[in-house]
Image (spheres, grey):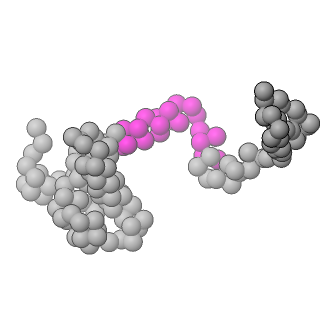
């Protein structure tokens, strides 16, 4: 028979002859968020903007994790999409490496990373400074139908 005794912030659980003692401490969970700039921005943001941010983040994750035939291929494809997106949107986060160098490090071609970045731009209606001009993209990859 399991017996539980509580003594304020301490307690014990007895299971037959074995007694397990435990304790707890007061923890300031709010301290984790204090000083986090994202939390500060979101706390002051109107609810509709927070929802818009959540929807946008969801769309980006769905784009990265487009369904593949098997889990291994899906993981690799998601990584390549995420790497291409990061290299295009915030190249400084990846050491400002070129698509060629990043592709070599990831074991894929420069053109695949570039194509994924262009695919993201087309789907989300954005343009990265790092990317080719729209006319050059269309002539290289063909117009999207």
Figure check: 108 above or below 126: below
Q: Position of residue 100 (x, y in %)?
A: 22, 70
Quadrant including the N terminus: top right
* Number of numbered tags placed on the structure image: 0
Figure check: 63 above or below 35: above
Magenta span contains residue 56: yes
Which residue is pictured at 28% across the width and 70% down the height? 105
Horizontally, residue 24 falls left or right of residue 132, namely right
Magenta span contains residue 37: no
Quadrant including the C terminus: top left
Residue 123 lies in quadrant: top left
Q: Which residues are magenta?
A: 40-61
Q: Position of residue 30 (x, y in %)?
A: 73, 45
Q: Position of residue 19 (x, y in %)?
A: 83, 41
Which residue is pictured at 83% across the width and 31% down the height? 4
Residue 131 lies in quadrant: bottom left
Residue 6 appearing in the image: yes
């Amino acid at each position: 028979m399991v017996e539980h005794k509580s003594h304020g912030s301490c307690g014990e659980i007895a299971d037959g002859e074995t007694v397990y003692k435990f304790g707890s401490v007061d923890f300031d969970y709010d301290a984790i968020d204090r000083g986090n700039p994202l939390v500060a921005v979101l706390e002051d943001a109107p609810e509709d903007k927070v929802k818009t941010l959540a929807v946008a983040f969801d769309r980006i994750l769905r784009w990265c994790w487009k369904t593949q035939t098997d889990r291994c291929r899906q993981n690799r494809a998601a990584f390549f999409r995420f790497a291409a997106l990061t290299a295009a949107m915030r190249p400084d986060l990846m050491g400002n490496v070129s698509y060629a160098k990043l592709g070599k490090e990831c074991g894929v071609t420069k053109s695949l990373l570039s194509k994924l970045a262009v695919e993201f731009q087309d789907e989300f209606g954005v343009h990265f400074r790092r990317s080719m001009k729209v006319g050059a993209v269309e002539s290289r990859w063909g117009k999207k139908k």
